[in-house]
Every structure is written in C-alpha cells, then in structure tokens.
Image: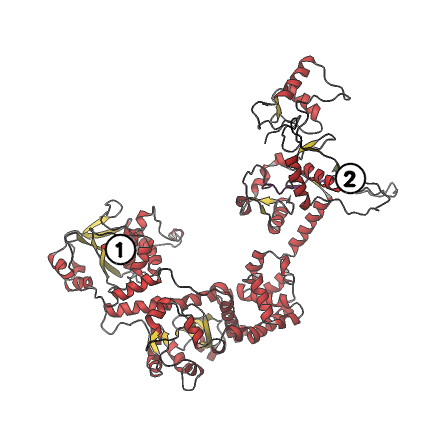
Amino acid sequence: MSLCINCGIATDRCNTIGRRRLEDEVILSLVQEWVAPQSVNENDFICQVCWNHANTVSLDGNRPEESEQVPIGHRRVCIHCGRSLLRRIRCHQLRTGTIQERRIHKVIREWILPRTVGASSVVCHSCWVRANRASRHFQSGPSTSAATSSAVNVPNTQDIPHVEEPPIRQETYSAPRAPTVGTFIVLPDYYRAVETENRCFVEGCRRRERNRITNTMRKQLLKMYNYYVPANNRLCDIHLTCTSWDFLNDISDNIINTFSAHQIKDMFSLKEADCNILDFENIECMEDHIFYHWVGFNKDQFRQILNEVPQFLNLKNGSLILAAYLIKLRTGDSDDRLSTLLQIPKTTLVTQLGKARSLLYDYFVPHHLGLNHINKQQIIERNLLIPNELFGWHNSEVKPIVVLDGTYVYVQKSSNYKYQKKTYSLHKYQNLVKPFLIVCTDGYIIDVWGPYPATTSDAEIIKKEFGNESLLRQYFESGDAFILDRGFRDALPLLNDCGYRTYVPSSLQQGESQLSTLEANKSRTVTICRWIVEVVNGRFKRDFKIFRQDFFNRASKNVMVHFEVAAALINAFHPPIANRSDAQDILQKINQYINVENQLSNYVINNNINRRRAQFQAIDVERHNVSEFPVLTYSELILVSLGTYQIKQARSYYGEHVRENGSFVIEVCREVTGDLQQELATSVSTWMLRGRIKSRHISNRMYYVYILVDSSLSGRDAIIQYYCTCIVGKRTVGCCAHTMSIIWYLGWARHQGSQLPPAQLLDNVLLYYDNPNEDVE
C-alpha cells in the first residue's frame, strides 16, 4: 500500500487522489522538513494535494515558521490504512487514558513503524477493531526492571524507568549506554519483524495463510541471521516451509532495530532455550519434530511406554533414561557420543541404559511379543485377503497363516576361535548371528527366536524348534499354514509329518533350466504372500540403526534383548499392513490363469525361435513409433505383474538396456506364420515382438522375451501371451521383471514423457578399462 509521506492518505485507493514521486529536489527538501525526523527519499510518494501545497510554497518562497502548522493535503486520515475519514462517523482518536487505549496505542505504533503516532492521530473503526483484537496477544509489554510503584510517576506504561545513579568518582569507568529512541532500545547488530497477526510477517508477502511461527524457526532466525520474530507472528504456507532465509539480508529498507524491554527479554529466553534443545525430563518443552527425530516415536507413544512400564517413573530421571535407550536403538551411536549429547557421565549412562533395557525386556516385551501374548484366533483375524483365499481354508475352516524367515545381525571378529567359527558366514563372508521371526500376513510379529550361529541353516533351526514336546509344536495345530522360502526344503518332511501345510517356491530339478508353467504359477502365489516378512526385516534396520552396524563383542550378549525390544516396539506402534485396494482383482487373475498353460513358450521352444533372425526386424522405438502396442494404465500394469515389485525393477532394466544400445531397441515379427496362428488360435491382426534383456546378476547372460499382441484389441486384453527364457519365464500368473520391463516401457512409460535411467550419478563413479585383447586378431 502506498501512503502519502506527508498526510498519510492511501494514494492507490482512489484514482482521483493521485500521487507524485518526490523526484524534484526542492520539493523533496521541503517535505523532509515537514515530516522530520522521519526519513524521506526520492522513491517515496506524496498525494497530489500535498504536492500542490509544496509546489506553491517552493514557488512563493514563504516557508512556514516553526510555530505555524505544516500544510497537509488531507487532515482526517486513518494513520494505519490511509482511508480518508472526512465523511466517516465512526473513527477513534488515539489516546492513552485507559488500559485498553494504551494497548491499542502500542499496537498501532508497532504497525506503522517507522512513522510515529501524533497527538491528533486517528484510526478508522476497522483498524481500531483489529488493533483491539491484536492487543490481547501483543508481546511488547512494559519493562519490569527495578522501579517503585508509587515513588515514580511513569507517564507511559511502556517507558523503561530511569533509575538515578549515585555520583561516581571521575576516575571510575562508566559503561556506555545503548542508544534509545523514545521508549525503545536500539540494537545495531539485531533487527526484527513487525509484530502483527494479520498477515505473513515477511515484508512484501501478500499470501492469505496465517500459520503461527514455531519456536524452532524463531530460534533459527535469531541464531543465524540475528533476526527476531515475535511469538505471535504469522507465516504463509510458502515461508513456513522455507529452508533458506538469506533473502533477509536484502530487505535493508524495512529493517527495524528498535526493541522493547519485553522483546529483549524474549530474545534472551530464545537464546537460553537454544542451548537446552534436548530436555527429555520436560518433553512438553521440546519441539515435536525434534523429539521424533531423536527418539523415533512421538510424545504420545513415549508416554504410553511410560504408562505400561511405570517402573521408569520410580527412577530418578526415568524419562531421560528411557529416551537415552530409545536414542541408542534408533541412532546406534556410541556411549561416548550419547554421554556428550545428553550431558551425562559415560559410566552413569551405561548403567542407566542397562536399567532401561532390563525394564523394557521384563515389563514391555511380554505384552507385545511372544506366543503367550496372542492366541490362534487373533492370528486368523490378521490374515490378509489374498493369503487367506489362497492358503487359509482347510477342510472348510479358516486356519492361521504364518510366515517364517531368518535375518542377520552383524558382529565383530573375535579372538575366541570357537565363537569366530560359529559366527562366520560363508554366504555373507562376514561374522553374524541369526535371529528368527514368525510373522502374521499383515506384518505383526508373533515371536522371535535366537540368536543362532551363522553356520546354522534355516532348516536346522526349524528341526530344533519343532522337535518333540517343543512349545511351537504345542502352539500350532494340524492344518495351520506355513509360508516359507527354499531354504526350508530340508525341514519340510518334519513339518508335513506334524500335519502342517507348507508352501514353498519350487526349485529347479537336476537337468532343468526353467520351471514348468504350473510350478512357476504356484511359486508366484507363494511369493505374492511371502514378501511381508522381508518388509518386517527391513523395518528393523530402517527404524533401529543399531542393527545396521557391527555389534561389539562386549555388547553381543545383549543382541537378542535389543532385538526383542525392537520387535515389541514395532508391534506396539507400527500400523499393520492393510489389504490392497485391488486385492479382489488380483485374486480373480490368479484363479483365471493358475492352470493355464503357456502355449507361446511351447511354440518358441519347439520351433527354436531363439535362433531365428530372418523373421524379426530390429527397430528403434523412439524413431519407429510402435503405435500398435496398446497403451496401458498403471493399474493395468499391476494386473499384468500381480504386484509392484516387477514394475519397480522394470525401470532399472530399461536403464541398462538404454545404456547398452543408446536407445530402446526391440525386434518385431509382423508376419505371424500359420503354425503360430493355428497353435495359439490368433487372428490376422496378431504380431509378435522379441526383446533381449540382460540379467541383473550375470553380465554374460541374456534373456529373450516374447510378447504376442493383437492390434485389434486395446488395453490389457491386447496382450495375449508372453514368455521369457528366465527361470520363471513360463508363468501365466503374473510375469517376470524382464517381460515387465518391455511392457512397462512400450505400454506406459514412453507415454509419460521423458524417462531417465535411475541413479545416473553413479555412471561415472568407477574407472573402466578396455580389454587390450579385444581388438587383437
């Protein structure tokens, strides 16, 4: 808003008022005399009437005497918004008689800085109401420095009382006083924002959102930029999430470096609070995001732990002890770093961490982990829709479904050779121990066992834990479903003898290079349910970084205690995995194709199509628009692969394919032979494409992908069949990642705009040397 620098009227509210820039040096000097001590420059404006007055005075040369009144174009103007009050009945004279008037006077004086409030200043009723509302939260109160209540007559409650100093000797040093302006103190190295709740305090921002500024941001601005923001100021959505405030250095025209006593006191409190940012004994004083950043749980969850383990409240600094242990689990920091962070002696910290670990293990873990904390019916209620329909029913009765798997926790090498040999894994080439998990299909952890030696296989663990008279054998009943991986195959006879139903992905038999269509389909029904346990394993190392690093030998005896506490915390506070929104559609596709033979694979194998080149023409997808390939939605991609894992892998396969060939190259067979039409019952609009996709594990291995497309159809129905030469390439329930990489690009990705290969920053990290023998003949 542009106000006349002389009379204060808003020059942009009405076109008839008019405004003139102070470009004339004579008029500029004259206006500077009129509004002194307020600063005026050539970029300021005055209204047309004031300019006429100044022009007349400059031409006549009769400047008003000091006793005469300064010429003003508009005498009755709201000092805040600049409205003309000549014809307005409701307006208010700014007085300081009552407490309410003094508060409003302070707010208006703050709003109009650097202008001042005169004896005859008035405001419109709208501004008066807004100032009255803002005065309830206004922070610029009077100084509370030493002064008697009756001996000194203070004309204004905001004035800083002056205390008479006793006479001092001439040789005594006298400290310089800070300069003052009226009742404010000038701090040259600090500046502040205008105190207002009506808008974003950033000068020039016109957004309408009004979010209260957080104490963390106030501390940051004061610490990094010497910029003080009053407590009740507001921010818009853009500046609330602003990460850099360097632009504050460019707003020198709007700097305010005058502070009241209350504001200076608030600045000291912010400085003091910044030194004690981690106060776990008074968590209400901590910012929510800072608390969560260190502990890994919000304040309500932290209080729930204290309520479930009230023994912490009986300890001195019990809240701090619990927080220290949770920080240890979350960050994995050493005791030295934690003692420095929490300002606790290291020996005291080690003792307190041991107490917290014992209390949680004794009182918290039994309520959230173990066979005794959950019954069979509760496990059944946690069966998700897809696993329940595939494996849950047995003899017309729903049975519990559990997923079993082991994970790894790495430990240090040891001079104890027996321990060293037991913990060294020839699979991982590292020392480790193996915790073992039993998980529901929604990710809820039933129990954890261990730690087992690295040399013990998953099958051996099952054999030991399901031996005669074992607790697990007594807990589970005949007909219960176990979803396992291939590492359990040696333990399957034992589990089957116990009456349990076991579901394991199929393995290749001797002499085989691919699974049959039925075996590949059954394997897919297992993997579509078994991924849950991999997600749970990932949560341990994602949320508790202590399990990412090697455990010291001295701390190895507590590995399983830490692991069980972490499992109980995951069960208590992590939301369970919910059913997919498209679960019914996926089940329908599984039931539709589970027993369907892959006829395209039979045709390719019987006719040795992999070795044929004449029928296929290599084309560049970017240059030759393959318009016949159907356009798919992302939901249709999911129904092709029956999940998102293959779709996520497709982008990486695409990236390697593009890096190898420079563009996305496929081979197309336009003319389908009569044999193919007869065997697959295809139409004349059918055509076949072939792609060559490199293995992600073995550089010299190439997989051939065949996709049969009917141009007369659209969407998912246009993809009739597909086949890949990989191990599971014959499946008709879903597809492999190699097949999906071609369908993903041709049917979806190329229609979404430019697709960049993932992790391009790693392309030039390694040094590659050409093989000197390649060009030698």
Residue 141 colored magenta? no
Q: What amino acid does circle 2 point to?
A: Asn
Q: Are marks 2 and 1 in contact (CB under 8 Å)?
A: no
Residue drawn at point x = 44 percent, y = 78 percent: 422
**Quadrant for the C terminus in the image:** bottom left
* Residue 22 found in image quarter: top right
Task: Find the residue positioned furthest to the left.
Answer: 674
Q: Name above or below for residue 88 compared with residue 247.
A: above
Depth check: give the residue in front, 483 or 453: 483
Q: Which residues are magenta?
A: 185-203
Q: Main secondary structure of the magenta part?
A: loop
Indicate the position of residue 438 as horizontal and vertical percent values.
43, 74
The earlier-in-sequence mark between 2 and 1 is 2
Element on which disc 1 rests:
helix
Q: What amino acid does circle 1 point to?
A: Arg
Regarding residue 706, the answer to whether it shows in the image is no
Task: Find the residue positioned furthest to the top.
Answer: 60
**Residue 716, numbered circle:** 1
Q: Residues within 10 Å of mark 1 (few under 14, many from 20)?
A: some
Indicate the position of residue 79 as horizontal and vertical percent values.
67, 31
**Quadrant for the N terminus in the image:** top right
Depth check: give the residue in front, 516 or 471: 471
Q: Kindly identify which residue carries mark 2.
A: 156
* Residue 489 found in image quarter: bottom left
Indicate the position of residue 150 as horizontal and vertical percent values.
85, 45
Q: Residues within 10 Å of mark 2 (few under 14, many from 20)?
A: few
Indicate the position of residue 66 as horizontal and vertical percent values.
76, 22
283 on left or right of 385: right
Residue 200 colored magenta? yes
Q: Name above or below for residue 7 compared with residue 547.
A: above
